[in-house]
Image: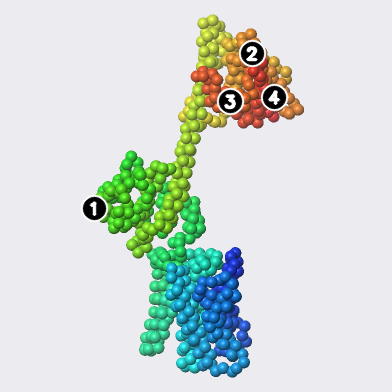
């Protein structure tokens, strides 16, 4: 039953590899030969499921077919000539290589061959493959690194085949244990074949294999070998016998399983395996697509309460698979600690080194490997460092961060000696790309923070401007009282009106004080039912009466509306006062009120025959806050405030004007 699982896993693995090859966009003889060899191996894995009765002769038939196609592929590899199948078949050495598997396939079809001869054929076939692998590896030259996984894959599988059939040849009977193990062995070695396809560029086969898949597959191979050795030791203990053999065997099994789980849970062990695979099986140390996605996710993952600086440091450490580090900023040539991960603050000697690094990074953007700096200081030209203090430095990598062209700070990273990495050109390029991405993230957040703070100051400034605008209105009321005091101070009605105005002024000033203390320019104001004609007449009589020309109020029809009467009075005062200032003393300023029942609105128009405004001025400047034509006498927010107020209550403000003719402001106010 266990053998069935092994062959099923092998069939699935080679079927997936076959699918990868079939979906590869690039075509060529190498791809087609690999497809044939992979398909033959997949068929070989499925062969036990096709047979009603499994016999040695039938198994060996599928073995020969598999070996034939792999030998054809190796024959093509001998001269790296994958131009055409005809070119490969025209070579004499190709037919010499294929002669033995061809005989092994054809002869049993016509003659009754003894099992020993079949075992001999398979032993020689396996030996032939091993010899061809040695020739290919020897002549590979600079491409040996690329061919290494293929050599390991075919070498391991054919060495096992050689041992299996050599043993069968000696005892004249094949050991079923070997047959049962074949499926698992071929499955475990698939990653080597995939890596070989990925590495050898002149094959022209473009398939993708993830480093994580190779890592996990390698860990499974290691686990399988380890458990096999432990099982073998347990078998030896049981074979040796003894009263305690079963107990020792069971104890050994569980202890070995516990040890295996412990090792696999070790981050250090996984890192060592990953570094080994990266160095020996991949052209590049990094799977850049995967690393970029991982870095982006690391920057996006901000834990609650975690600062942006801690996120940045964690991103650097995760990108390098390092364990501890510091993020420091240069402020007035001093060190400011921004984030740390399992690292202590710098000691006095390390601070001395940091100052020397600061001077170096002022004119040189270069990542520093402390181990390299100790042994090869000439690599870091112009870096003057105190080597006595450098001996106290415990971190391993120093990565500078720049804001545009200005040196900003450093990332200091440390790892265990076993898993630390020495800088080479690829690691420097990778770290440079990571630094650019992380620095962009960091400075974007700092800029966003500055924008938020500036927005708060802008809101406070805007609120102060509105308060100042209201103060001017209050001052106008007090000025009006003082102007009329000498003439009407003995008039009881004037005294009553003055007290009423002062109460109103006091209420307005209290409101402005609340706005200033609460830093909010949009405090809720009371809305109540009011009559526009009364509100506008009050503004005309109390705040605009001492200016020329006099304002004419004409009420055609009206109905009560609900709004903030104080804000509406400010809007009307500003618009009427502006109309008076823009009109000659002998001109006119008229205010007309009309109820438009068809659209349930009150329409208030303010017209004058003053200097007027150009179309460009209305479009570009009239409603722009803090833009005034009155110099220091104005704040430039009156028209903006009027437009904003009307839009908030669901109305709108419309302006018609012509230079040297006059202006008409039309206010539409909801009446429902």
Q: Which mark is residue 551?
A: 2
Q: Between marks 1 and 3, how big is the CA–CA gap? A: 67 Å
Cβ–Cβ below 8 Å for labels 3 and 4? Answer: no
* Viewer-proximal residue among 296 and 123: 123
Q: Residues within 10 Å of mark 1 (few under 14, many from 20)?
A: few
Where, quadrant-wise, is the C terminus in this rendering? Answer: top right
In which quadrant of the rendered view does residue 614 lie? top right
| Residue, disc 3 | 621
Mark closer to the chain start, 1 or 3: 1
**Spatial CA span between label 3 and label 4:** 27 Å
The residue under label 1 is: 388
Disc on the earlier residue, 1 or 4: 1
Asked whether, in this view, residue 578 is left or right of residue 139, the answer is right
Q: Nearer the viewer, mark 1 or mark 4?
A: 1
Image side of residue 608 versus residue 385, left or right: right
Does residue 345 lie above or below 493 as drawn? below
Q: Note whether residue 564 is visible.
A: no
Contact check, label 1 and label 4, Cβ < 8 Å? no
Please provide percent x and percent y for residue 76.
Answer: 54, 75
Q: Earlier in the sequence, mark 2 or mark 4?
A: 2
């Amino acid at each position: 039953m266990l053998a069935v699982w092994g062959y099923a896993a092998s069939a699935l693995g080679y079927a997936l590899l076959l699918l990868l090859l079939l979906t590869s966009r690039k075509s060529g003889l190498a791809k087609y030969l690999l497809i044939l060899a992979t398909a033959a191996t997949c068929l070989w894995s499925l062969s036990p499921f096709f047979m009603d009765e499994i016999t040695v002769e039938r198994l060996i038939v599928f073995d020969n077919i598999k070996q034939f196609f792999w030998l054809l592929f190796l024959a093509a590899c001998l001269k790296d000539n994958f131009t055409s199948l005809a070119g490969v078949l025209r070579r004499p050495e190709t037919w010499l290589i294929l002669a033995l598997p061809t005989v092994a396939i054809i002869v049993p079809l016509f003659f009754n061959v003894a099992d020993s001869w079949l075992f001999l054929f398979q032993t020689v076939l396996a030996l032939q493959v091993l010899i061809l692998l040695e020739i290919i590896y020897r002549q590979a030259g600079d491409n040996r690194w690329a061919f290494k996984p293929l050599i390991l894959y075919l070498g391991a599988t054919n060495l096992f085949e050689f041992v299996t059939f050599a043993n069968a040849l000696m005892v004249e009977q094949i050991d079923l244990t070997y047959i049962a193990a074949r499926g698992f062995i071929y499955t475990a070695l698939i990653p080597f074949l995939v890596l070989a396809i990925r590495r050898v560029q002149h094959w022209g086969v473009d398939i993708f294999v993830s480093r994580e898949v190779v890592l996990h597959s390698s860990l499974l191979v290691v686990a399988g070998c380890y458990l096999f050795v432990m099982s073998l030791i347990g078998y030896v203990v049981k074979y040796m016998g003894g009263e305690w053999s079963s107990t020792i065997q069971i104890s050994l099994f569980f202890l070995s399983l516990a040890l295996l789980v412990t090792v696999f849970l070790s981050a250090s062990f996984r890192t060592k395996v990953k570094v080994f695979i990266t160095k020996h099986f991949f052209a590049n140390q990094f799977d850049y697509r995967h690393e970029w996605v991982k870095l982006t996710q690391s920057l996006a993952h901000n834990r609650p309460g975690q600062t942006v600086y801690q996120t940045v440091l964690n991103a650097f450490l995760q990108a390098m698979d390092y364990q501890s580090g510091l993020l420091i900023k240069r402020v007035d040539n001093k060190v400011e600690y921004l984030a740390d991960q399992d690292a202590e603050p710098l000691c006095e000697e390390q601070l001395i080194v940091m100052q020397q690094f600061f001077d170096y990074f002022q004119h040189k953007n270069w990542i520093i490997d402390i181990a390299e700096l100790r042994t090869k200081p000439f690599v870091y030209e112009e870096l003057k460092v105190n080597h006595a203090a450098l001996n106290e430095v415990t971190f391993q990598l120093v990565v500078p961060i720049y804001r545009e062209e200005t040196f900003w700070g450093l990332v200091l990273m440390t790892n265990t000696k076993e898993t630390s990495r020495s800088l080479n050109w690829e690691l420097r390029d990778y770290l440079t790309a990571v630094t650019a991405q992380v620095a962009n993230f960091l400075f974007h957040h700092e800029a966003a923070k500055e924008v938020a703070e500036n927005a708060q100051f802008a809101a406070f400034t805007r609120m102060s401007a509105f308060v100042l605008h209201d103060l001017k209105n209050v001052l106008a009321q007090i000025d009006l009282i003082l102007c009329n005091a000498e003439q009407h101070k003995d008039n009881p009605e004037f005294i009553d009106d003055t007290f009423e105005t002062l109460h109103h002024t006091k209420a307005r000033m209290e409101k402005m004080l609340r706005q200033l203390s609460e830093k909010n320019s949009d405090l809720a104001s009371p809305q109540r039912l009011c009559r526009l004609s009364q509100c506008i007449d009050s503004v005309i009589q109390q705040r605009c009466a001492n200016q020329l020309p006099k304002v004419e109020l004409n009420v055609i029809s009206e109905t009560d509306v609900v709004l903030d009467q104080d804000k509406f009075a400010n809007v009307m005062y500003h618009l009427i006062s502006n109309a008076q200032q823009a009109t000659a003393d002998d001109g006119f300023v008229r205010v007309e009120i009309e109820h438009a029942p068809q659209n349930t609105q009150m329409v208030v128009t303010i017209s004058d025959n003053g200097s007027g405004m150009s179309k460009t001025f209305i479009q570009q400047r009239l409603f722009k806050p803090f833009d005034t034509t009155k110099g220091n006498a104005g704040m430039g927010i009156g028209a903006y405030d009027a437009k904003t107020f009307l839009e908030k209550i669901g109305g709108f403000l419309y302006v018609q004007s012509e230079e040297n003719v006059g202006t008409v402001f039309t206010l539409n106010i909801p009446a429902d």
